[in-house]
Image (cartoon, helix red, strand yellow):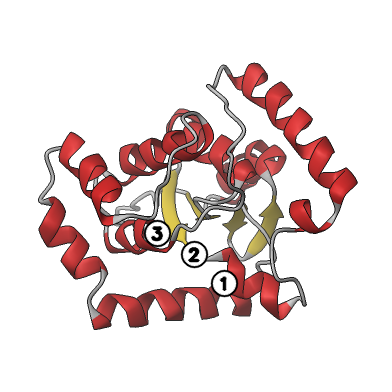
Amino acid sequence: MTTHQTVQPCIEFWFEFASNYSYLSVMRIEAAAAQCGVKVIWQPFLLGPIFESLGWNTSPFVLQKLKGEYVWKDMQRQCQKYGLPWRQPGIFPRRSTLPLRVALLGSEQPWIGAYCQRIMRLNFAEDREIDTVEQVASVLEEFRLPALQLIAEAQSDANRQHFRAQIDLARAKGVFGAPTFFVKGEMFWGNDRLDDALAACTEAGS
């Protein structure tokens, strides 16, 4: 008698802590995916090198004044829609390398979702810095995690190399912004495509 194991559908979630639209997705993807029976594969990466490869030295929301003005109004509407706290960051985009390196290190750990949500709240709900050892350690300690050990591992040569490879992988996959989702190799870009990506994920049975 042959038994068939059901493979849990998965969604790749590429995000950046400096990305305002990633904030919306980080705060809701775990609950939305759980409702669909989908596993989230967390893929933190750095947008700066991606933008540089496109000829930009910062976020397009900064480079294009009218787009930037629109985006902050849109963020107010979207946060109200999802019931999320919102405070426009005084610095945008904020440096986010250290918390992203920690996220990469813990991407398969049970605390990854809560950690990412806390970092995002610091940036987009509390307007606080996120790229300091003290701040990241404080977040990790909130979850009773070995903060100094994790930060040391995150800053190790091995993890730095892993992080560079992660950025190269994002570029190779054609990622040009965040958040970006992949379902069986098909790309969905933007927070407003999260629901479509989850629907495709369950339909595909990936």
Question: Residue 67, percent across and down?
Answer: 85, 46
Q: Which residue is mark 1?
A: 170
Q: Who's the residue at 40% across and 48% down the image?
A: 130
User: Looking at the picture, which amino acid does disc 1 mark?
Assistant: Ala
As measured in the structure, the alpha-carbon distance from the residue carrying label 3 to the one carrying label 1 is 14 Å
Question: Residue 131, percent across and down?
Answer: 39, 55
Question: Residue 105, percent across and down?
Answer: 28, 63
Q: Nearer the viewer, residue 127 or 120?
A: 127
Q: Is residue 154 left or right of residue 203?
A: left
The nearer-to-camera label among 1 and 2 is: 2
Question: As drawn, which residue projects farthest toward the right?
Answer: 66
The nearer-to-camera label among 3 and 1 is: 3
Q: Is residue 9 depicted above or below 172 in this figure? A: above
Q: Which residue is mark 3?
A: 100
Q: Residues within 10 Å of mark 2 (few under 14, many from 20)?
A: many
Q: Residues within 10 Å of mark 1 (few under 14, many from 20)?
A: many
Q: Who's the residue at 36% across and 36% down the image?
A: 118
As measured in the structure, the alpha-carbon distance from the residue carrying label 1 to the one carrying label 2 is 7 Å
**Circle 3 SS class:** helix
User: Looking at the picture, which amino acid does disc 3 mark?
Assistant: Leu
- Which disc, if any, is residue 45? 2
User: Looking at the picture, which amino acid does disc 2 mark?
Assistant: Phe
> Would you say the residues marked 2 and 3 are in contact, meaning their CB atoms lie under 8 Å apart?
yes
Q: Nearer the viewer, residue 176 or 184?
A: 176
As measured in the structure, the alpha-carbon distance from the residue carrying label 2 to the one carrying label 3 is 7 Å
> Would you say the residues marked 1 and 2 are in contact, meaning their CB atoms lie under 8 Å apart?
yes
- What is the tally of numbered marks visible in this picture? 3
Q: Earlier in the sequence, mark 1 or mark 2?
A: 2
Q: Earlier in the sequence, mark 3 or mark 1?
A: 3
